[in-house]
Image (cartoon, helix red, strand yellow):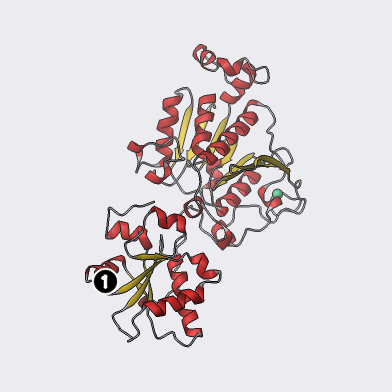
Amino acid sequence: MAQLSVEEVGRYGRQLILPEWGRRGQESVKGNSVLIVGVGGLGCPCALYLAAAGIGRLGLLDYDRVELSNLHRQVLHCENRVGVAKSESGRDAVKGLNSHISVTTHTVLLDSSNALSILSQYDIIVDATDNVATRYLLNDGCVLLGKPLVSGSALRFEGQLTVYGWRGGPCYRCLFPSPPPPASVTNCSEGGVLGVVPGVIGSLQALEALKIASGMEPLYSQQLLLFDALGGGFRTIRLRPRQPQCAVCGENPSITALIDYELFCGSRADDKDKRVDILDPELRVSPQEYSEVVSGGKPHLLLDVREEVEYQICHLPHSRNIPLCHLQNGSLDATWEWILETTPTANDPTYSVFVVCRRGNDSQLAVKLLCEHGKAKGRGEEVVIRDIIGGLVAWSETVDPLFPKY
Ligand SMILES: [Zn+2]
């Protein structure tokens, strides 16, 4: 058991006097180590409370760098550390808070080749990532090494928390033997999140990790906490127990070493946006080519297929907002007819319809839907519809640096 210094007794006095915690709990926490995988919206508050409470050794793992759009929720980072590795920015922040703890940074993307050697250096693992491939990777690694996994997630106004692999409790695979279809998974970058929601869940992850480290029982083994920040508050549901036929923690496991998780899940193990590429090259223009259409005064139509809430944040002049979901849900024909009405009828070959979205994925889907609809009506030749490659993000990066990037 680690011994407390006089200074540490003074620092942790308010929690030392809790009978459930006491000197014994504090010394146990000092003797324990926690790895936080993902120093983002969940990992930042979690790291803050673990450091403040006096965890002996903290590991901070993240391959990514701090961006301005992280700061509303990733509260360890700050404006003058934009561009710095998140693991290092996080280390500087928690060392400033508590110089008694030891902090190790891992600036890598966790994968099957490095996971076991990194996870094995810690007593407790916190999953603060938001992609499915890493969830399976962490789960299997923790089962193989016999370590508890404190798992959290937060999206939009909703959060979840549970502890896997705690004293005979279920693992992630017991509950989800196979991954969801890749297209059904949304991350914060696509779906949005209110910053305080991961703040609440990350703080609760710190609480569960501290209870384990101090020798107390975690509350959410085989239980899932659901947090609905819009109207429902907190609710707990009981999870199914460990499954004897589970592929990794069952009685005859088929997974006895780490596998290729990107292949298994059909999705990437980072939180970056997936890029689709579904159109013929002649149906795509670069932002520069579109800006020449605008500056040359060429007549054209610009459809912006983002959600209305995003259109209200910023949009290009003279664009018309028709969300992709409207095209997918009934207004395709009306939009097609409207395009034909607006387009000069004399088959003006210089006239084009352009479609834009945030990153150039939805715009391709919209072009595909509209072109297929036109063909089905036998009128596909009457108008040329193209998407703007990379969308408004590429526009702000290559044509107009003053255009808002969100
Ligand atoms: Zn299992």
Residue at position x 48%, y 52% in the image: 271
Which residue is the extreme one toward the left? 296
The one nearer the camera, 370 or 97, is: 370
Determine whether the residue tagged by mark 1 lies in a helix, strand or loop: helix
Q: Report which quarter residue 299 is drawn in.
A: bottom left
Residue 370 spot, x, y in % from top left: 46, 76
The image shows residue 2, relative to residue 307, as above or below, that is: above
Give the residue displayed 51% in from the left and 11% down from the top: 6
Q: Is mark 1 within 8 Å of ligand 1?
A: no
Q: In screen coordinates, is 108 left or right of 236?
A: left
Q: Amino acid at mark 1?
A: Val
Q: Is residue 348 above or below residue 390?
A: below
Residue denoted by label 1: 293
Which quadrant would the N terminus be assigned to in this image? top right
Q: What x and y, as percent, mark residue 212?
A: 65, 31
**Residue 404, image x, y percentages:** 33, 52
Residue 67 visible in the current orientation: no
Residue at 43% across, 55% down: 310
Count residues near mark 1 (Cα–Cα under 10 Å), then give few for <14, some for 14-19, many for 20+: some
Q: Residue at x 54, y 18 (%)?
A: 12
Res 258 visible: yes
Against 118, residue 206 (above or below) is: above
Residue 364 image offset from top left, x and y in percent: 44, 70
